[in-house]
Amino acid sequence: MLDDLRDLYQEVIFDHNRNPRNFRAMDDADRQIDGFNPLCGDRLTLFIKFLDGKISDASFQGQGCAISTASASLMTDIVKGLTEDEAQRLFTLFHKMATGEHVEMDELGKLAVLAGVCEYPARVKCATLPWHTLDALLQGSEEPVTTE
Amino acid sequence: MNQKVEKVAGYDVERIRQDFPVLDQQVHGKQLVYLDNAATSQKPTAVIDSLVEYYQNDNANIHRGVHTLSERATLSYENARKTVQRFLNAESEKEIVFARGATEAINLVANAFAQKISTGDEVLITAMEHHSNIVPWQMLCEKTGAELKVAPINEQGELILEEFEKLISKNTKFAAISHMSNALGTINPIKQMIELLHQHNIPVLVDGAQAIPHISVDVQALDCEFYVFSGHKLYAPTGIGALYGKMEQLEQMAPYQGGGDMISAVTFDKTVYNKVPYKFEAGTPNIAGTIGLGAAIDYVNNIGIDAIAAHEDSLLSYATEQAKRINKLRVIGTAKNKGAILSFVLEGIHPHDIGTMMDHQGIAVRAGHHCAMPVMDFFGVPATARASFAMYNTHQEVDALMAGIENLIEMFG
């Protein structure tokens, strides 16, 4: 009876929620920053390490719903090896996808599993919280990020 | 229903449901099951009609026109004040001040008491307060240098009365306590708490926002200085609520906002304030909403608040019993004396996912921190899902809730 929810809750999302990738603290991170969604209480800490102008490692900790956990898990996987500019560009693309703007899905790779979120206005912020947090980190901010 | 259900004799819930047109609809192709009543309740036709009738026949500003419509509007507005007075059993209708809701009423009182409180004084609240009964007092403390004291709760979500008593001292200058917790459902022993505070001559504000649709309130018997509530949780429109204050208190208090209607004479040198309660009602108020509040109270009185409470208690017991069958479910808030709120978490499933998945089955529950973040911190959860019951909910809807929860547990795997 919940079949029509499969657009939002794809199996990949359940998988990343049950076994989030890169879910660990990073003692030697170059930068770290907190993200917080005051509306629902979701919070995460994002850790990033750089090497030769590229993101060499990314990890996160925190607690959130399946959508935000899966989004953080996928994000920390996909940004490894990207330059700051490339990661910023991916943030812009992801944000467009999550808010229902047209984007070329091919460019988003695995992140496309979160495309369904644009149909759920109350849940868009769950998916974009990790990305807004990354964006702030790349901009050099150290203040906690909130989605409000 | 595979269990004996203790229904309330003579309570015709199906007939009541017909008075609430919003309930008759489908959401995501399923019959709507509205269980978010602690956030706001639905409105009966009598309330909706009272708004339409006012705007169609009587719309005018109050307290200032000699023309017929203004007189009618004023009469209806002041009649609603008397209705609230009788509902709370206040001594005089002049002790009823209309406000936008419980939040504004609390701010009004906090604002006035900021002038009477200073460094070294203490304000006492409890750990189960809604943000609206925390933040205004924090603001007062910031302004005055007073200290906020918070009485703790136990694992069941009940106030620890001995600890509450220990926090009362000669420095305590005000206490603000919730009648019923919106996040846990706990009903506080407010009569006893007020008596303790009065032994030290401490004025008390009772936040009745959650209690008002469930519990019969008698402010004279309680002897509290202030009692506040929001209309929209009592089947009335949003944007209207009331403050009850003892006359001796209200008379000493400074106005909250300046403007029209709260004055009796204005020159550029000096303004003479109007009498209580008008001195606290600056500007054109929510006239239609106030009339709607009167209509809602009439509607509730017609069914009887005690009959409503008995029905809701029966729903809560049934839901609590049924919830025990779901292994992954943990109820947050298990006080012995509890109103019709079932706050819960499911192992491994975040409340926001619960909210979305329930909505897809037509079931409206609240997921979040319920404007009570300190309560969430105490129980070590980021949020809970909350089903809250009102006079029109049925035992079949409790079954739908439980089936919905089982479906989503299955989907999550």
Image (cartoon, coloured by chain):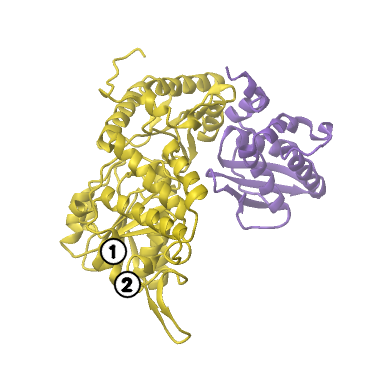
Chain colours: A purple, B yellow
Mark 1 sits on what residue?
B174
Residue name at image x 25 percent, y 37 percent: B337
**Of helix, strand and loop, which one carries label 2?**
loop
Residue most toward the bottom? B269
Residue A131 coordinates in the image, percent (x, y): 69, 44
Q: Chain of mark 2?
A: B
Residue B378 coordinates in the image, percent (x, y): 38, 45
Residue most toward the left? B199
Placement of B29 over or under B142, stated as above or below: above
Q: Chain of mark 1?
A: B
Residue B151 at least partly seen:
no
Please identify the quarter of the rendering in which residue B81 is found.
Answer: bottom left
Please identify the quarter of the rendering in which residue B265 is found.
Answer: bottom left
Mark closer to the chain start, 2 or 1: 2
Q: Which mark is residue B117?
A: 2
Residue name at image x 42 percent, y 53 percent: B101
Circle 1 packing at 10 Å, graded few (<14), some (14-19), many (20+), is many
Viewer-proximal residue, A22 or A70? A70
Question: Mark 2 near mark 1, Cβ–Cβ under 8 Å?
Answer: yes
Placement of A44 over or under B21, stated as above or below: below
Three-letter code for the amino acid on which mark 2 is drawn: Ile
Residue name at image x 29 percent, y 62 percent: B94
User: Which quadrant is the N terminus of chain A positioned in?
Assistant: top right
Count every numbered label the image shows and give the total: 2
Residue most toward the front? B68
Circle 2 packing at 10 Å, graded few (<14), some (14-19), many (20+), is many
